[in-house]
Image (cartoon, grey):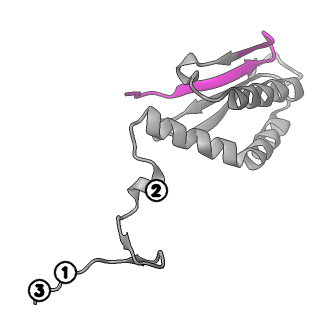
């Protein structure tokens, strides 16, 4: 369905604006708010422009840019802040990647990709083998 990178959301310190892609409007409001807070706080702390984009495989990428004339942009702080956000928001970011892969790329959820095995009475996975007697 999608071939290029798709922007989920972004914020700009220059325009003092936040952008959210309405293709993702079905996300829960709490997730949308968390994304907005994360992006806006990043641009307030670091400066520049931050966008969260999905690549062709469904991985969520943090993209930053700054004007050449922006002496206030903290390039080193940017790398550190992104690593911090990726660590602190790992569960949210992984969930967003799964959401994108399922609803936009049409992939099966992870639990459906696993090999089907029947379970015995104690819930243990067993391979079914037919007896040729």
The residue beneath circle 2 is: 111
Q: Earlier in the sequence, mark 3 or mark 2?
A: 2
CB under 8 Å between discs 1 and 3: yes
Q: For mark 3, give the secondary structure.
A: loop
Note whether 117 is above or below 77 in the view shown.
below
Q: Earlier in the sequence, mark 1 or mark 2?
A: 2
State the residue in front, 103 or 87. 103
The residue beneath circle 3 is: 132
Residue 104 spot, x, y in % from top left: 44, 32
Q: Is residue 59 visible?
A: no
The quadrant in which the C terminus is found is bottom left
Residue 17 spot, x, y in % from top left: 76, 12
Q: Is residue 96 visible?
A: yes
Q: For mark 1, give the secondary structure.
A: loop
The residue beneath circle 1 is: 130
The quadrant in which the N terminus is found is top left
Q: Residue at x 60, y 43 (%)?
A: 95
The part of the chain drawn in magenta is: 1-18
The alpha-carbon separation of the residues under discs 3 and 2 comes to 32 Å
The alpha-carbon separation of the residues under discs 1 and 2 comes to 26 Å
Residue 90 spot, x, y in % from top left: 70, 48
Image depth: mark 3 or mark 2 in front? 3
- Left or right: 34 as drawn, with respect to 25: right
Count all numbered tags in the image, as a single digit: 3
Note whether 50 is above or below 109 in the view shown.
above
Q: Residue at x 68, y 42 (%)?
A: 92
- Left or right: 63 as drawn, with respect to 104: right
State the residue in front, 26 or 77. 26
């Amino acid at each position: 369905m999608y071939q290029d990178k798709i922007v989920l959301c972004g914020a700009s310190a220059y325009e003092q604006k936040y952008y959210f892609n309405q293709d993702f409007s079905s996300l829960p409001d709490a997730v949308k708010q968390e994304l907005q807070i994360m992006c806006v706080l990043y641009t307030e702390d670091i400066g520049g422009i931050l966008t969260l984009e999905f690549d062709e495989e469904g991985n969520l990428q943090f993209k930053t840019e700054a004007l050449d004339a922006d002496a206030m942009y903290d390039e080193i702080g940017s790398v550190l802040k992104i690593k911090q956000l990726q660590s602190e928001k790992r569960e949210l970011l992984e969930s967003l990647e799964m959401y994108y892969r399922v609803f936009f790329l049409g992939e099966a959820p992870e639990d459906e990709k696993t090999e089907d095995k029947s379970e015995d009475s104690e819930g243990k996975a067993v391979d079914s083998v037919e007896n040729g007697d």
